[in-house]
Amino acid sequence: MGIFGNSSLVGLDVGSTMMKAVELGNRRGKPVVEHAGIVAMPSGALADGILIDRAAVADCIRQLYRNQRLHSKHVAVGLAGEDIFVARVKVERANGDDLAELVRREAARLAPFPLEGASVDFQVLDTLLNSRWIHALVVAAKPGKVGRLEDLLREAGKTLEVADSTACALVNAFEVNYEPAPTDVTALVHLGAALMTVCVVRGSTPLLAKDLSLAPSQFSEEEWSTTDRIAVQLERVFELMDESADEHPLEPRSSQIQRLLLSGGNARLRGLREVLEERIHLPHEEMNPFRRIEFEGSDALARLVWDHAHCMPVAVGLALRGFDGT
């Protein structure tokens, strides 16, 4: 889901230290990797999801396009951080504008910032005809957030076609590559340099999505290592799940999570696996965003992508927005 519609897209994941891009083609109705790449971000150009140096980031986008011969000027970009709100809401069954108004009203009640002037989109998650209620996933961006992205892409000579949350992009990549059973409960954990995104899904339906800071200043013990901060944030998310299950018995508890799928640059952080085994006690593995997506082109492209596969799920999930049904 996203704030704009679909077309042939380049999925662009702009992180604080690295920028990743994936362009998919369509081979007999299935996605194939045509172009992909990764490039270092200018130091300090992006902080906690906030654009600091637009000109430097625009130049980085142009460089990535040149180096990897990306074609489409239509871009899907992921959003994460304090300026983004993602939540599953429950409203009474309605249609059209009435449903949109109910969803927006419930989202406004839950959001940590006012939704007046914000970019808001939602997707219905279930359509059980015998139920009085509808669950929907809402994504909202603070006023001006999407406009600044449009300005950035325009400066780089591109067009912002989709603005989606990092959590939704992860779910897209997971659904296509893992084809989960409807009752499987999985935690998708994307570990960037400054932010981590956790999305708990049942099947491919998001139950909970959180963007969490890894900055030392956000913790009572600032001397904690990054691996300890990751574990603490995961523990907090699981506590939220259990609190929700206490209030709503049909919601899954953290004990029902079957595995963690890790991605992002910090997924290979030294000592992380040991800390997760000691504190989280769940099976975990790297998420493979190319598990069911083939490569088209040179062996060099395949090697480049595989070397950085753990960093690419968000870019893949965004590029998949160019296919119907994602």
Image (cartoon, rainbow, N blue to C red):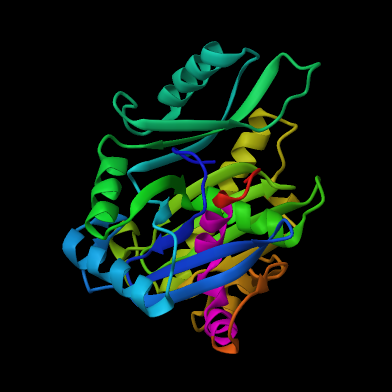
Along the viewing direction, whichever of 219 and 256 lies nearer the viewer: 256
Height in image: 257 above or below 266? above
* Residue pictured at 64% horizontal, 56% vertical: 187
| 322 with respect to 248 (left or right) | left
Along the viewing direction, whichever of 320 and 18 lies nearer the viewer: 320
Q: Is residue 311 magenta?
A: yes
Residue 293 horizontal/vertical position (percent):
68, 68
* Residue pictured at 29% horizontal, 26% vertical: 117
| 52 with respect to 18 (left or right) | left
**Residue 143 seen in the figure:** yes
Height in image: 298 above or below 29? below
Residue 262 horizontal/vertical position (percent):
59, 67
Along the viewing direction, whichever of 37 and 87 lies nearer the viewer: 37
**Residue 280 seen in the figure:** no
Determine which quarter of the picture holds residue 277. bottom right
Q: Which residues are magenta?
A: 301-320
| 233 with respect to 255 (left or right) | left
Quadrant showing the N terminus: top right
* Residue pictured at 24% horizontal, 46% vertical: 148
Height in image: 85 above or below 48? above
